Amino acid sequence: MCGIVAYLGQKTAQPILIEGLKRLEYRGYDSAGVALLSNGVIKIKKTSGRIAALEAILDKPQANETLGLGHTRWATHGVPNQINAHPHADYTGKIAVVHNGIIENYSTLKTWLQNEGVTFVSDTDTEVIANLIGYFYEKCDAGERTRKPQGQNRFEWAVQRALQEVHGTYGLGILCADCPDMFIGAKKGSPLILGVSEGEYILASDAAAIIEHTAKALYLSDNEMVIVTADGFHTKTIDNIAVTKSLENIEFSLEQIELGSFKHHMLKEIFEQPKALTTCMGGRIDPQNDRIHLGGVNDYLRAMTHIKRLIITACGTAFHAGLVGEFLFEQMARIITETEYASEFRYRNPIIEDGTTVIAISQSGETADTLAAVEQAKERGATVLGIVNVVGSSIARATDAGVYLHAGPEIGVASTKAFTAQVAVLTMLAIELSRRRLVSSDEATRYIKELAKIPDKISQILKQSEHIRTIAQANINQNNWLFLGRGINYPVALEGALKLKEISYIHAEGLPAAEMKHGPIALIVDGMPAVFIATNGPQYDKIIGNICEVRARKGKTIIVATEGNDHIKPYADYLITVPDAPELLQPMLTVIPLQLMAYHAAVLRGHDVDKPRNLAKSVTVE
Ligand code: M6R
């Protein structure tokens, strides 16, 4: 939810921290700050607002300041103001902390520290960590309860003692004024990576802040800490047990996370979809030999051939992909499938009988609710598979096996290419299961061939971006929109409504088109936009009926239809076309105009598309 960064090396730390924070800004952007170690004193500068606001208050970078921390915040405890911004110093001024996560027992710890005479200045849970570390650092070896093992570094010990008291989640970067060549990172439940290059170390919440410096990285696991000094680094558990870890390669390049000629990451990612899907399906679908290879789950496919039930769990856009998956598994492979919000699944005492497989879908692989749902399903004995984009992320590691999206980094807060890649993976899995379950081998062959054509068809749709912009422009003053679809295009309607809401702040509802007459039709007034997905398929005639109901009440119809369908023209105030495809493969096409519509509407309304208000890219808190 927040972005953290720490640097130790020979270079001036401040510009490196700021550059890193800019790369992490999509994780949170309501306040920001840096801490630098300068001649044995920790200097903190922080402010509400974005990184640009922080830059405006910074002093000139000093060449002797080669160690520091940075933070970009998405507020949980305490409003986004200067005092609550990170880094947080402890009451002695010797410790500084940046934190991503939530400390659940902060209130108990705060009261205990206050009774010990410690004063607090902010409303955050993070300040409790800073003060706890400061407390143990100050009291080290003062009594039996605070006895440190002989030979252990005092700062390192104080961090361990503090973290042993803490319940909750954290990715932490920590400095000590007495340790001029050292920082500590610690992780539980929030991602943390250490980039390692020649004599320099950069710790960050994700690889985007590291890749500019090095492709070699150490991925910390939960309950681990890394102690970084000018002479190297070592890893331990927070209980002081040494851990040996090896460096891994960061899989993406700097180019992939830069805007290039695009104005926004969201637009770049929408246009990247043909390539993202080609990569996602590359080596996995083989139309010549009529085969699908999903290496990551291969060992599980035989068992899955006989499963009784599938549960898909996810949040937001990934949940909508899961709803598409529900149609795919039921229609193609005839497996009973339910899709559940991870935030509900984890608390509903789910019934998981023998023969149930759970699939968790997540772009980031860090969504707290989805991760908790995975743990819950595992505790109940289910096999849990992951469909995840970020390699090595918490959900990827927590699941028994999985399929990576290989869609490339997604920076825009509004998820786009991850959705189509998630649907592509679900489709491949459903086709393979349909064949193994002997549902219909001819159908499987046809789907494999059609799937291979999807990237080119998306490229065709993207050519209509300007046309879609003019439709958005014509309806930009409307504050209520409906998105309507039937069958497998109903989840696409939900996704279209979510996209419009989250970046253009226009109220929108996604509905199964036939449900409209059971209530929502009361909303329709003169000029209200109703976006229909009315592509060729068995329910085409039915949806024409729903379109007529809206037109009869003077709603404006924006229709996504199949290319070459002239019949629909009289029903459409605005028409967008997509190439023909089998009904079950259409969501990867019909979602594209809706993504573009939301993008253009947000730009026309003057919003910051990549950093919509109140949101952050990965939701690592409940
Ligand atoms: O990283 P995840 O796929 O687990 O994220 C799930 C949702 O938080 C995410 O899809 C969110 O709804 C997006 N902002 C939608 O555009």
Image (spheres, rainbow, N blue to C red):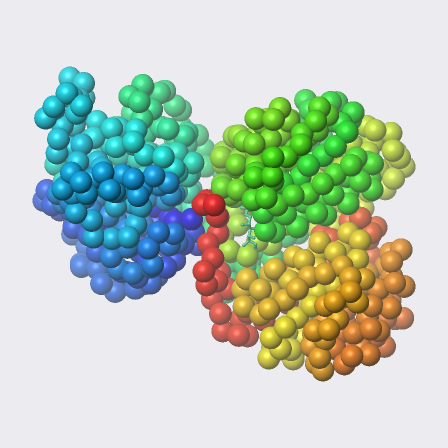
Q: Position of residue 238 (x, y in %)?
A: 31, 26
Q: Residue drawn 26% across and 59% down?
A: 82
Q: Is residue 558 left or right of residue 154?
A: right
User: What percent of the width, then of the height, locates residue 199?
Assistant: 26, 34
Which residue occupies the foreground of this view, 93 or 579?
93
**In the image, residue 136 above or below residue 490:** above
Instruction: Report which quarter residue 503 is drawn in.
Output: bottom right
Specify the quadrant of the image occupied by residue 484.
Answer: bottom right
Q: Is residue 466 left or right of residue 519?
A: left
Residue 92 visible in rendering: yes
Q: Residue 449, relative to residue 59: is it above or below? A: above
As rendered, which of 136 and 268 lies closer to the eye?
Answer: 136
Task: Identify the residue at horizontal 41%, vertical 30% (top origin).
Answer: 222
* Residue for point 79% across, 67% down: 517
Q: Nearest the camera: 108 or 541?
A: 108
Q: Residue at image x 87%, y 29%?
A: 438
Quarter-of-image position of residue 148: top left
Residue 390 visible to the viewer: no
User: Whole-percent x and y of residue 243?
Assistant: 35, 20
